[in-house]
């Protein structure tokens, strides 16, 4: 897969991220692989927090924010741009 395709596939699902990481252009799409990994980890955290009584509203609001981050990330990948996500874009995992 080329850089653009790898970036797009990494945002589609968590399995898509794994496929993009293993079969894609890791060096070219490293930015989007990192951004999408952050989105997926935040989504998992928000899903767990939203199940906790009385605190679940925070997880639900966070889930909406993560959805917006996901949209921004996939649009940037489609346009082949390296725009950091708001609030969490500076985190480097890869």
Image: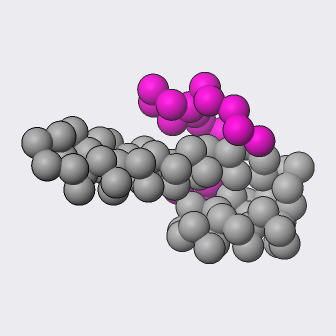
Residue 56 drawn at (x, y percent):
18, 47
Q: How many marks?
A: 0
The answer to whether residue 9 is visible is no
Residue placed furthest toward the front: 53
Q: Determine the residue positioned at 69% across, 32% down.
A: 92
Residue 86 drawn at (x, y percent):
45, 30
- Compared to residue 85, the image places residue 33 above or below, namely below
Return the residue nearer the eye: 94 or 55: 55
The answer to whether residue 24 is visible is yes
Q: Determine the residue positioned at 56% across, 44% down.
A: 38
The majority secondary structure of the magenta stretch comes to loop
Return the residue nearer the eye: 47 or 52: 52
Residue 42 drawn at (x, y percent):
45, 46
39 magenta-colored: no
Q: Is residue 79 left or right of residue 28?
A: left
Quarter of the image with the N terminus is bottom right
Residue placed furthest toward the left: 54
Q: Determine the residue positioned at 52% across, 55% down.
A: 40
Residue 62 drawn at (x, y percent):
29, 42
Colouring chosen for the image of the structure: one colour
Quarter of the image with the C terminus is top right
Q: Is residue 72 left or right of residue 25?
A: left
Q: Is residue 69 left or right of residue 80?
A: left
Return the residue nearer the eye: 28 or 88: 88
Q: Determine the residue positioned at 70% across, 38% down.
A: 93
Which contiguous range is marked in magenta? 72-94
Q: Is residue 20 left or right of residue 11?
A: right
């Amino acid at each position: 897969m080329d850089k653009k395709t790898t970036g797009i596939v990494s945002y589609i699902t968590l399995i898509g991220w794994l496929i993009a990481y293993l079969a894609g252009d890791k060096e070219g799409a490293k930015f989007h692989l990192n951004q999408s990994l952050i989105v997926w980890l935040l989504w998992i955290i928000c899903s767990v927090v939203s199940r906790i009584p009385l605190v679940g509203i925070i997880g639900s609001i966070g889930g909406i924010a993560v959805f917006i981050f996901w949209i921004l990330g996939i649009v940037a990948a489609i346009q082949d741009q390296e725009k950091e996500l708001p609030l969490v874009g500076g985190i480097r995992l890869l």
